[in-house]
Image (cartoon, rainbow, N blue to C red):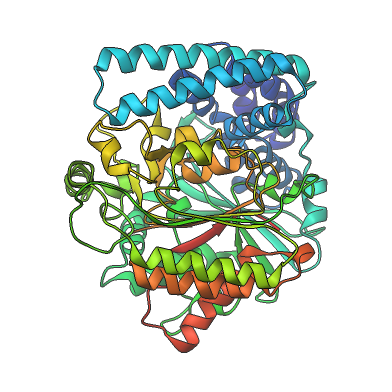
Amino acid sequence: MTQLNAVVNRAASGDASAALDLLEEMEVPLLIWLGAEIYSTERTAVRRNFVASQSDYQHVALSLAIQNPDLDRAQSLAATALLRFKGLQAEEEASLSRLVRRGRYAVLGQVAGEVRRLREDLARSFHGGADPEKVADLTQMLDEKELKLGQLSRTYRAQLQVREARLVDLQGTVSGNRTLVDFRRYRPVDFSNWTYGADRWAAVVVRGNARVQVIDLGPVAETAPWVRSLVAENSDADTSAQALYARLIAPLALDPGTTAFISPDDFLNLVPFHRLMPDAQTHWTEVQRLNVVQSGRDLLRLPLDRPAQGLLALGGIDFGGTPRKGRMRGGHQWTIGRADIREHDTDVSRVRAASVFRNGFDPLPGSAAEISVIAAYYGDARPQEPVVVWQGLEATEDRLMSNVSPPRVLHLATHGFYRVPEGRTDRPMLLAGVALASANQALQGNGEDGLLYALEAQDLNLEGTELVVLSACETAQGFIGHGEGVYGLVRALRTAGARHVLVTLRPIGDQSTAEFMKIFHDKWLDQPPDQSEPGKALQETQRHYIQHNPDADWKPFIVIGAP
């Protein structure tokens, strides 16, 4: 903090160059310190809050860039800050999981096994209504083991992977017709008196060898109602889609001929960017190639060195019990885990979520036909690869978690859920998940398996998996962390090794989803295996619907990940 004070003092005196010198000197030592401190305390909530507390560095870097638009160095330093600091803890988790999956260090595997068992026990206790004291004890034991695993892993790594991410390398990946748009919720700094203003959006635009641009996009508070309307797809959705495009995209002056890679921040992670509208008749997906990534580092990832093979599809699942009636692949209406977005919806969502967890999950007859068709498509397109289908009571959580052969594609056609937290939550990855075989018995406390929480999904073996499709409701939902994205299924599956994840933002219909997935897989499997782009296939599917069936529900689906 003393160093940051010096940066602010230099900026206040009008010496932006000296302020940048000091800020640049801080970066690597701060990353090293953060990396050490992440695993210096047992409680995962404390570690999460600690990382979030270091956002001041980014706020200062962005403020310097925005207040000095002609200073190229300020723009580049802000871009580097986002490249290295955004999603820092998620990067650590993914790196650690990869070390464990590779199995090079026996001691890591032993502790990782203990972590996995504790995660399973905690998840079962959580949905089984266990005594709060038992849940607290399990949480503490898991905190201790995760801390030990993190500390052990650091002896096998010379440095944080994020420190290896360089702006010049990123610029090399977005040369030609590619552009990265990296959004960040930031607090503008008044350097004259070292105070912060109200939260605003900033975008860092990186275009190959062109100069980096850092652009202020206005107050966060003004966009919240538009995002709420758009995600809920209510009667004002088209108006909100135009307003968000005008506020967030139009000022960037993107060339329509380029492919835009969008890295959202905060509740923008839940915006269907393809749904934004430049005008009243046009969706953005119609006029520009779009990809959503978790951070700019996605564009720096090396090709898969252990590509998996084949399809594993789960559908037509027997949830057991006597469910309520309905044909939606989820338990309740959309929710967003941040108060400034969901303030009008939280109570209703909690009631609906409680209803599902009380009454159970419906059968999804459309999902059986869906995976049957997709399996046939895959077998025809890639006859040399295995195709495996699990239905009914075969599609168990234990079987999926124990699967030792990662598939190229994992397709889950089932129910998804997200439970809005009531107050503080130490383990936000226990709020999102999907239903598998015998889920209704698990809800009644009559079985140990059936609900796969994001906390447990982190331990799936998806090493080399190219695509996970969550053909279920609300699978993009989760708890939103400061600068760390969404704590939910996407984060869990990417931690487990998946390259791309297709998810949904809100409840979806059973039959309409089955039809959407058939079209998506048909278009994706038309691509050569060595030139696979799930994001492109999704966009082609969206354009198909706009041209041939615009009234169908094609809008809530998004793919996260870079080719």
Q: Quadrant of the N terminus?
A: top right
Is residue 482 at least partly visible in the picture?
no
Q: Where is residue 432 shown, x and y percent of the image?
A: 38, 41
Residue for point 71% across, 67% down: 382
Image position of 281 (left or right of 165): left
Residue for point 35% across, 58% down: 506
Image position of 543 (left or right of 332): right
Residue 561 versus residue 281 in the image, above or below:
above
Q: Where is residue 291 shown, x and y percent of the image?
A: 61, 62
Residue for point 35% across, 64% down: 230
Q: Where is residue 395 shown, x and y percent of the image?
A: 45, 48
Residue 476 versus residue 420 in the image, above or below:
below
Please identify the quarter of the rendering in which residue 459 is found: top right
> Which residue of the protein is positioned furthest toward the front in this rendering?
393
Image position of 559 (left or right of 472): right
Please identify the quarter of the rendering in which residue 378 is found: bottom right
Residue for point 44% across, 74% down: 515
